[in-house]
Amino acid sequence: MLSKEIQLEVNKGAMLPLMEEFYTIQGEGFHTGTAAYFIRIGGCDVGCHWCDVKESWNAEIHPPTSIDLIVANANKYADTVVITGGEPLMWDMTLLTQRLKDQNLKVHIETSGAYPLSGTWDWICLSPKKNKLPTETVYDNAHELKVIIYNKHDFVFAEEQAEKVNPNAILFLQPEWSKKEEMTPLIVDYVMNNPKWRVSLQTHKYLNIP
Ligand SMILES: C[S@@+](CC[C@H](N)C(=O)[O-])C[C@H]1O[C@@H](n2cnc3c(N)ncnc32)[C@H](O)[C@@H]1O
Ligand SMILES: Nc1nc2[nH]cc(C(=O)O)c2c(=O)[nH]1
Ligand code: SF4
Ligand SMILES: [Mg+2]
């Protein structure tokens, strides 16, 4: 249990349950191949059975950390910060993104969109999940839509999500890691037949980097 004081700071978004921070190469989606400082915030209740960071789900095991400390660390690295999780939009992102932007950092988010949009973002990567669909504000503001393909039905889900997202969003299909041998060839065929989509791979896993 957090003390009342710390709980109030977390509610304001002045402290956040920080799981890890690391400087790496963005492995996925539109910005693949570019250096970025990743900030992983704990807490997620979406429950994807194939999630590759299940250790992030329980916010209570990740220490509430002041955003001043998070920003000071981020500022030492590249000019781009990626906020991920867990599900970062479970928390109020207003203060964290303001402080990062005050340092002239570009601020990106990886989100399922399952919670209302908070914060000011240079890039929003929306990766919708069937269990808990995105809110309207995230569909309207996403810069990219990245749908994970675990089985054939996920192509149908991907088309439904493409109908809901704003028309400027760039569309990606990304194989679920454990099914990649089976799904990647289907994605390749799908993109050739439906060229509004692009392929996204988890390239950091091939590069053996975080
Ligand atoms: C771990 S999630 C954290 C951010 C947010 N909760 C979300 O789902 O977008 C980061 C990205 O990894 C993707 N992802 C998670 N597990 C994966 C897996 N096993 N294979 C492929 N992509 C995966 C998610 O869809 C999301 O785009
Ligand atoms: N290198 C690298 N790129 C990523 N892109 C999205 C990631 C995430 O977990 O949100 C991720 C990650 O965990 N590592
Ligand atoms: S929404 Fe993201 S963090 Fe949450 S379970 Fe799904 S992939 Fe994992
Ligand atoms: Mg990851």
Image: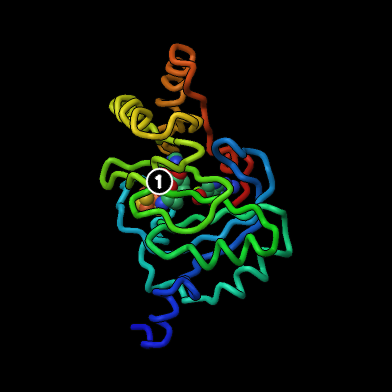
Q: Is residue 150 visible?
A: no
Q: Is mark 1 on a helix, strand or loop?
A: helix
Label count reads 1
Q: x, y (%) of residue 43?
A: 38, 63
Q: Which residue is drawn at 41% across and 61% down?
A: 55
Q: Give the answer, above or below, for where 151 lies relative to 24.
A: above
Residue 23 occupies which quadrant of the picture?
A: bottom right
Q: Residue at x 48, y 33 (%)?
A: 169
Instruction: Classify 10 Å Cα crowding around label 1: few (below 14), some (14-19), many (20 and above).
Output: many
Q: Which residue is drawn at 49% across and 16% down?
A: 195
Residue 176 occupies which quadrant of the picture?
A: top left
Q: Which amino acid does label 1 sit on?
A: Val
Q: Which of 129 and 201 is in front in this view?
A: 129
Farthest left residue in view? 131
Q: x, y (%) of residue 111?
A: 44, 49
Q: In which quarter of the image is the N terminus?
A: bottom left
| Residue receiving disc 1 | 138
Q: x, y (%) of residue 122?
A: 58, 48
Q: Give the answer, above or below, for where 155 lies relative to 70.
A: above
Residue 163 occupies which quadrant of the picture?
A: top left
Left or right of 136? Residue 120 is right
Left or right of 187? Residue 37 is right
Q: x, y (%) of residue 27?
A: 59, 42
Q: Which of 115 and 179 is in front in this view?
A: 115
Whether disc 1's CB lies below 8 Å from ligand 1 is answered no
Q: Which residue is drawn at 46% across and 33% down?
A: 174
Farthest top residue in view? 193
